[in-house]
Amino acid sequence: MRRWHVLAFTPNSVGDEEGVLDQTVYEEAPSWRPQVNAASLRARFWIGLVQTINKLLRKSVGAEGAEKKPFDVITARKRVKFLENIIAMVPSNATFEDAMGAPVAGPWVRIERTAQPRTLLYVHGGSFMLERSGVHDALIANICKEADAAAFVLDYRLAPENPFPAGIDDVKAAYRWLLGEGTPPETLGVVADSAGGGLALAALIALRDEGVAMPGAMVLLGPWVDMTLSGNSILSNLENDPMVSSLEGLNMCSRLYLQGHSPTDPLASPLFADLAGLPPTLIHVGAPEILRDDSTRLATRLRAAGVEAWCDVYPRMPHVWHRLGPLLPETKRSIKEIGDFLREMLPGRSEDRRRVG
């Protein structure tokens, strides 16, 4: 029987974002497991730059700051998309083509001159309110390149115009459409980041309850899966998180998304749902993240429910650092791990599946 390598995070003390990376190695470690080290100098520079821009942006749209102003979601979408498009580095051999016949708008992402035996459904993040941008396109294109896959990227309906559960319903519709188009579920993977991780997880839970076949794998990057904000890292990392440093901002996003719906609903906070029967799951999160404990608790609960799950906690990395592009060694390494994981878990349409477990 094949055994796997488990990586867990143990804080040294309350408020310590570095803590200890405890590694337990069993009989055989998977080939996609990376060596996790401290942040590179290049990463520290880019993280500092993004942190400065992010703070200025949040203040400019009224998300936080001493000068209170009404939050303007339209302006926020425009400014975030403009800035993220500037730093996006989409692979030159990636193509984007509108999906014909899909129930939810969005493009197919493909890598030229590759076989693409696997299919991915990508659910982007953005606090449930922000549009897909160039950094999301670059992220999923780079994952497709490493995983030898094509991806459908759905542009789900956004809050506050379309509150809970509209986004979840769109993910469900897109997943059912992919199956209806003839995609074998064992060759299908779901990839999602941040708020998109919560939407994707909730959608799969609902689909499982409806008797729909589960995908072969799931990858969640810094998922937001607890709308009650009950993780210890919400407070202990409040001064450490370079990207999401405002509890006020998280509460605002939660209110605009739920609009009076209970945050304890298992689909609003899928961390608290029955997780049995979900696909093998790889989770990435940064040690200094406010939402770090969403990931570590989710991995623990998945394993307790009998689901194969791995959570990699990267020292000093910000929320979904994968979007910073191939300039950073940490980004290249983590995206390669994701690609290798998807290759391992998804057989491809013309490949023999490698048994695990």
Image (cartoon, rainbow, N blue to C red):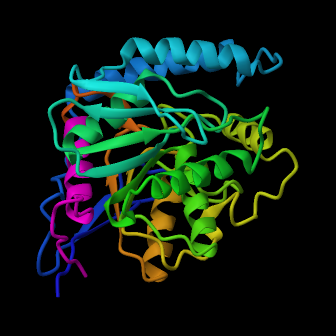
Image position of 180 with respect to 70: above or below? below
Image position of 145 with respect to 313: above or below? above
Q: Quadrant of residue 44?
A: top left
Q: Quarter of the image containing the N terminus?
A: bottom left
- Residue 196 vs residue 23, the one in the foreground: 196
- Compared across the picture, whether 76 is left or right of 317 comes to right
Q: Does residue 343 belong to the magenta stretch?
A: yes
- Compared across the picture, whether 302 is left or right of 58 comes to left
Q: The magenta stretch spans which residues?
A: 331-357
- Residue 231 vs residue 117, the one in the foreground: 117
Point out residue 297 in the picture as x, y percentages from the top left corner. Answer: 50, 66
- Compared across the picture, whether 71 is left or right of 45 comes to right
- Residue 321 vs residue 243, the one in the foreground: 321
Q: Quarter of the image containing the C terminus?
A: bottom left
Residue at 35% x, 33% y: name it.
109
Q: Is residue 330 visible?
A: no
Image position of 243 with respect to 171: above or below? above
Residue at 48% x, 13% y: name it.
83
